[in-house]
Image (cartoon, rainbow, N blue to C red):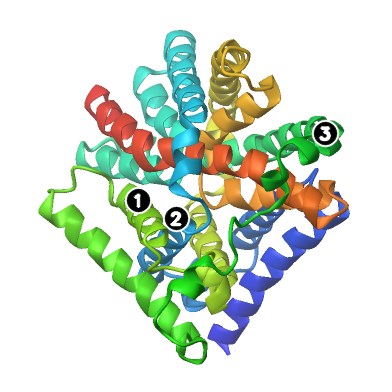
Amino acid sequence: MVFVFSIFMVMLFIFIGEWVSKASHAYIPSVFVTAILFVLGFWTFLPKTFVASASFGAQFAPICIALLLVHLGTLMSLTQLLKQWKAVCILLLGVCGTIALTMIVGRFFFNWQSVIAAIPPLTGGLVSATLMITGLKAQGLTAFIALPVTMFVTHSIFGYPLTSALLKSESKRLLKNFDQEKKENPDLIVREEDENQVEKKSIVPDSYRTSAYMITKVAAVALLAQLFGMLTHNFLNVNVVYLIFGVLAHQLGFLEDKVLEKAGVANWLMYGLIAFVFSQLSVVTPNGMLSIIVEIIVLIALGMLGMFLASWALAKPFGMSWQMAFACALTALFGFPADYIMTSEVAHNMSNTEEERNYLLNKMMPKMLVGGFATVSVASVIIASVFIKLL
């Protein structure tokens, strides 16, 4: 009964979040609502291990991440990825603005070690939080462990609604030009360049391309990515390698477009990853959060101000609205899958037709995804590694 109850509660929290988001037309992101429900559940009646009991534990998470990141490579072409260098520049400068403002101003009000412990999760989410917790334990600074965890929990409360609002504003701006751009560039209203391109090239008959067959191919690509990482001594973060190999396998025709969606497991893996991420909230107590909440909020405010100033400065030279530029910078707060979910929700709720939805997704999704990976998968690891040495 425990296992069935656990999966019931996980899915209940997720679908409530989805319904609230739908009812609010994406003004309240589903991941924000779901995070709040997880926190309240941990603080009241739910056991700390209920997510693991639902099968979304530490063993499931690495599999989930590997498969989803390879799958993500089948959602965009290599050309689309290379086109987003401007979004990466904006995001990286935004992260620099966050670090500069929080370190310069924050150290005048708070303890140096607490500032250093809290900043990396602000610019990299769960990955940085985990690295900082490990570093603090290794140096015996256990009194500061609550800071990166609480930062990881709290900054999402501000980041999710703000990013959603920015994407909604950008969607309204884009839709004003929809009719004109539809005439000038018809490809913008098509989500896939050629729906059947991969299937036509495949030597495997349609009836044999089962879900198991497609999942096996995705797992094979993930395995090759891991072997590449081992051979190169993890020169690149393995999450980045998963994405790169997914893109290459898709370009070569080995993986179908949206492969895990066609296999019917994409949503299940996505829900599992969300549940695992939010299970980290179990270590934060009400008293522990209240004791450091002022410092966390001040650092978040400084960090977001730094992101805004840096992204605003690059927006016009790079041909973006300040809303889109700021939204790209904010992906540093949460990365994948939240950036994917929020952009999809906003495009769905702001559009009236499939053409409008595809138009919004083609305009916003590549920037958000590439930006999120640039920080959460790459920059966050570097930042956390450097900050550990500053403790």
Q: Establish if 279 lies above or below 241.
A: below
Circles 1 and 2 in contact, beta carbons < 8 Å: yes
Q: Position of residue 390 (x, y in %)?
A: 26, 22
Q: Where on the picture, by quarter, is residue 42?
A: bottom right
Q: Establish if 16 lies above or below 101.
A: below
C-alpha distance separating marks 1 and 3: 34 Å
Question: Looking at the rendered structure, which numbered label has been put on residue 73?
Answer: 2
For mark 1, what is the residue?
A: 244
C-alpha distance separating marks 2 and 3: 30 Å
Closer to the eye: label 2 or 3? 3
- Asked whether 220 or 48 is in front, the reply is 220
Left or right, residue 39 beside residue 142? right
Circles 2 and 3 in contact, beta carbons < 8 Å: no
Sequence-wise, which precedes: disc 1 or disc 3?
3
Amino acid type shown at disc 3: Gln
For the point 41% across and 23% down, the residue is 115
For mark 3, what is the residue?
A: 180
Q: Secondary structure at mark 2?
A: loop
Left or right, residue 142 beside residue 33? left
Which quadrant would the C terminus be assigned to in this image? top left
- Disc 2 residue crowd, few under 14, some 14–19, many 20+, Cα 10 Å: many
- Asked whether 354 or 220 is in front, the reply is 354
Q: Secondary structure at mark 1?
A: helix
Q: Establish if 67 lies above or below 233.
A: below
Q: Position of residue 339 (x, y in %)?
A: 59, 45
Res. 146 in view: no
Amino acid type shown at disc 1: Ile
Q: Establish if 35 lies above or below 13.
A: above
Sequence-wise, which precedes: disc 2 or disc 3?
2
Sequence-wise, which precedes: disc 1 or disc 2?
2
Question: Looking at the rendered structure, which numbered label has been put on residue 80?
Answer: none
